[in-house]
Structure formats: structure tokens, C-alpha cells
Amino acid sequence: MVAVNDREKCCHCAGCLIVCPVAAIELLGTEIVVDRKKCTNCAACVRVCPVGAMGIGK
């Protein structure tokens, strides 16, 4: 299980990038991308997302 981003809901606030303790999330162009190998499933990004775009998935 890793963090996943719902691109349709994402408002690109970058809160998830800031709170990720392992720098597994980055902004590539206009897209939030999660590095599956780095993500530790801590859900910090899920808790900080103001629009519910971040979640935990496979």
C-alpha cells in the first residue's frame, strides 16, 4: 500500500510535498507523483490534503 493522488481532485497546494517525511512526493509539471519505492504509507499526505485528493491505495 502506498499514497495515491486523485488527479481530478488535486488542487496542487503542495501540502503533501511539504509533509512527506521521506520525500516520496514530487510535482512534475502540473502533476503530483508518488514514488512507490520511497513511500512508507505513513499517511501524512492524506491527513494534510484539503480536498481529499490523497489516499492510500495499492
Image: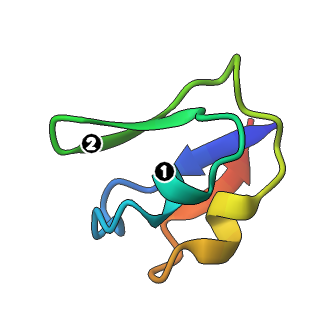
Q: Where is residue 28 in the image (x, y as percent from the top left)?
A: 25, 32
In the image, 46 versus 9, the foreground residue is 46
Number of marks in picture: 2
Residue visible at 30% across and 62% down?
A: 8
Q: Where is residue 14 in the image (x, y as percent from the top left)?
A: 37, 60
Quadrant the C terminus occupies: top right
User: Which residue in the structure is indicated by mark 1?
Assistant: 17
User: Which residue in the structure is indicated by mark 2?
Assistant: 31
Q: What element carries label 1?
A: helix
Q: Which of marks 1 and 2 is nearer the N terminus?
A: 1
Answer left or right for 18 relative to 19.
left
In the image, 37 versus 19, the foreground residue is 19
Q: Quadrant of residue 7?
A: bottom left
Quadrant the N terminus occupies: top right
- The image shows residue 42, relative to residue 53, as above or below, that is above
Contact? badges 1 and 2 (CB < 8 Å): no
Q: In which quarter of the image is residue 44?
A: bottom right
What separation in Å lies between label 1 and label 2 (alpha carbons)?
12 Å
Q: What element carries label 2?
A: strand
Give the residue type that dot 1 points to: Leu
